[in-house]
Image: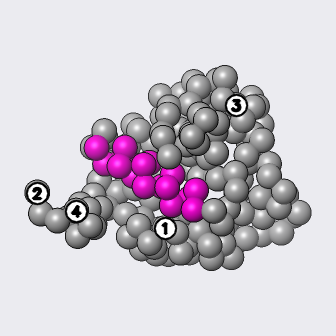
């Protein structure tokens, strides 16, 4: 999968992906105006994962590029067709970009506690559970959901890259 920085022209594809059937139970949603506002902010960067025909198959929103402590937040990570390996391919290229092109020390996220598929994916790449934000998210159905915090440090990423690729 190829990674490309997203821009305003990608909003329609991003919104279509995040509004996939049943996705409201696993990922957040933003309005067109909210996406425009985040894209215009220096705190955020959007990326799309492109398939073989340069079609958008996934997207990610990163936040806190202005964090003085080197913490970068993965606000949203969504693939168009879960269960086909797109998530692993997209997360790999996204992590490679983050740790190669930024000074990020800690890359972190929160996910719905009931989203075990996401937990398995993040754990596969070395993320560890940092805690639970109890009833922190108000879902579109009015139900409160727990969020599980997960993080990956640069040291952990570099150690896993060495294990896969061998010593430099």
**Percent from the top left, x then y, of residue 167?**
12, 63
Gap in angstroms between the C-alphas marked 1 and 2: 25 Å
Q: How is the image coloured?
A: one colour
Residue 45: % across, % down: 50, 35
- Taking depth in this image into account, of 52 and 131 the one nearest to the observer is 52
Specify whether 166 is left or right of 45. left
Callout 3–callout 4 Cβ contact below 8 Å: no
Whether label 1 touches label 2, CB < 8 Å: no
Cα–Cα span, label 2 and label 4:
8 Å
Q: CA distance from mark 3 to mark 4?
A: 36 Å
Q: Quadrant of residue 119?
A: bottom right
Label 2 belongs to which residue? Answer: 168
- For the residues labelled 4 and 1, the Cα–Cα distance comes to 19 Å
Percent across and percent down for residue 22 are 83, 61
Give the SS element for disc 4.
Answer: helix
Q: Which residue is mark 1?
A: 122
Which numbered circle lies on residue 165?
Answer: 4
Mark 3 or 4: the one toward you: 4
Q: Where does residue 164 sit, x and y in percent of width and height?
A: 26, 67
The answer to whether residue 134 is magenta is: no
Magenta span main SS: helix
Q: Is residue 90 shown in magenta? A: yes
Decide which of tag 4 and tag 1 comes sooner along the chain: 1
Is label 4 or label 1 in front? 4
Q: Nearer the viewer, residue 2 or 100?
A: 2
Task: Give the mark nearest the N terminus, 2 or 3.
Answer: 3
Checking the image for residue 110, the label placed there is: none
Camera-nearest label, 1 or 2: 2
Residue picked out by circle 3 = 11
Whole-angstrom CA distance, mark 2 to mark 3, is 40 Å
Q: CA distance from mark 1 to mark 3?
A: 25 Å
Q: Write the start and end of the magenta stretch as one range.
A: 85-100
């Amino acid at each position: 999968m190829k990674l490309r920085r997203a821009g305003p022209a990608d909003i329609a594809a991003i919104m279509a992906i995040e509004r996939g059937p049943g996705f409201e139970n696993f990922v957040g949603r933003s309005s067109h105006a909210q996406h425009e506002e985040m894209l215009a902010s220096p705190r955020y960067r959007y990326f799309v994962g492109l398939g073989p025909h340069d079609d958008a198959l996934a997207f990610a929103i990163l936040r806190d590029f202005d964090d003085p402590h080197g913490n970068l937040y993965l606000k949203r990570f969504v693939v168009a067709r879960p269960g086909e390996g797109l998530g692993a391919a997209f997360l790999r290229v996204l992590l490679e970009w983050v740790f190669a092109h930024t000074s990020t020390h800690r890359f972190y996220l929160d996910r719905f506690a009931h989203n075990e598929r996401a937990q398995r994916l993040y754990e596969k790449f070395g993320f560890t559970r940092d805690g639970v934000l109890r009833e922190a998210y108000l879902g579109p159905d009015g139900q409160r959901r727990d969020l599980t915090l997960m993080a990956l440090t640069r040291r952990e990423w570099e150690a896993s890259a060495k294990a896969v690729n061998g010593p430099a």
